[in-house]
Image (cartoon, rainbow, N blue to C red):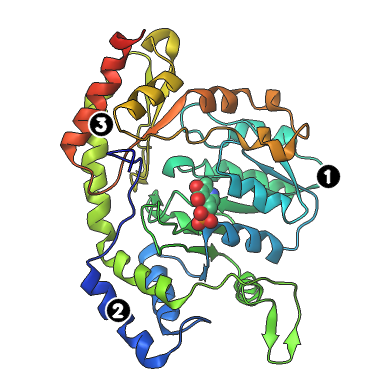
Amino acid sequence: MPYDIYVTKASLPPMEEYIEEVRSVWDTHWLTNMGEKHEQLQNMLKDYLDVDNIELLVNGHMALEMTLQAMNLQGEVITTPFTFASTTHAIVRNNLEPVFCDIDEQTYTMDVSKIESLITERTCAILPVHVYGNICNTEEIDRIAHKYGLKVVYDAAHAFGETYKGKSVGLYGDASCFSFHATKVYNTIEGGAVCYRREELGQKLYELKNFGIHGPEDVNAVGANAKMNEFCAAMGICNLRHVDEEITKRKTLYEHYMERLKDTAGLQLNEIQSHVRSNYAYFPVVFDETIFGVSRNEVYDYLAEAGIYTRKYFYPLTNTFACFENKYNVDDTPVARKVANRVLTLPLYSDLDVRDVDRICNLLLQCRFDKK
Ligand SMILES: Cc1ncc(COP(=O)(O)O)c(C=O)c1O
């Protein structure tokens, strides 16, 4: 492997625990299609996330895509370009048009003061992202959605297990879509879920994830195959037993990074928001080259040479992707552009050693003096 330390490392339960968990799958030969593990995990997550309704899916992307499909939307969706490809692709793949709203420079989530000016008669929904686990301004988004009769779907891929003012993040908007990808705080290898408000949406999602099959001889929607299989659900059951402990370890590392970097001029660190129980998913740093002396790209290269893989996350902005050439104007989202050009997420995962955090910080600070 070319790097000593990657930006993340997938969490795994002890192997024996997983083997014990999948033993019954061998007994039943029921490998997928909403089997026992799927049902068990769904119930466990409903409790853990403290939500009323949840539907498991094959991944976080299909959670977004199928939620938009289930809502039967048409027209424009206000969203953010400072996100992973999935958010924008879920909109476009539903034949909807993304309208990009700029972001807030502190939380990196949608700048809610800019939403209303983007609303037209064709707007049908708002799709904000809880970036790095920073919770969007849900109160203001709710207010706007209510005023204009818009649906709200949160991309909560980064926000597993978080609460805002004591309320589960899965209870905001009409639906919240989670990712359980291997690189996330909580994983089912690949997986995702939708927490939703109205029961009809759950029924639709249940059918859409299974080709739109309503009954043995009745297919009433053009669905896809987006079911979570039993092996992924079993991994989810095991990982859920350990996730609190993992978040506690992440918190210690996060605080250590903060302590080491907080007094350095030219670095913007990500403060945990008040009223938020955080999952410490990422450690983003925004570099101001004019003060820090070194650019984000130089830090990235310097750390890479030392065997440390960081990530320019999110860069590039989705509204600059080659597949959307000339469709969107990046000048409409100047703050997002500025952050995307300056941000780097540093390695953070539960079994990262605190001495590695020190090493990463030492290198990051040293690179100012080694600049050629
Ligand atoms: C913000 C965001 N949205 C959506 C996704 C898609 O999730 P998945 O990889 O589980 O399909 C991811 C992660 O990969 C993400 O980071």
Provide the secondary structure element on which disc 1 rests: loop
Q: Is residue 324 above or below residue 221?
A: above
Mark 3–mark 1 distance (CA, rounded to whole Å): 46 Å
Please state which amino acid type lies under the numbered disc 3: Tyr
Q: Residue at x 31, y 16 (%)?
A: 367
Which amino acid, by three-letter code, is at mark 1?
Glu
Q: Which residue is mark 3?
A: 257
Mark 3 near mark 2, Cβ–Cβ under 8 Å?
A: no
Which quadrant would residue 282 be assigned to in this image?
Answer: top left
The residue that disc 2 covers is 21
Mark nearer the N terminus (3 vs 2): 2
Q: Which residue was labeled with disc 1?
A: 121
Residue 110's place in the image compared with 20, above or below, is above
Establish whether ligand 1 lies closer than 8 Å to the Cβ of label 2. no
CA–CA distance in space, label 1 to label 2: 51 Å
Q: Position of residue 127 (x, y in %)?
A: 63, 48
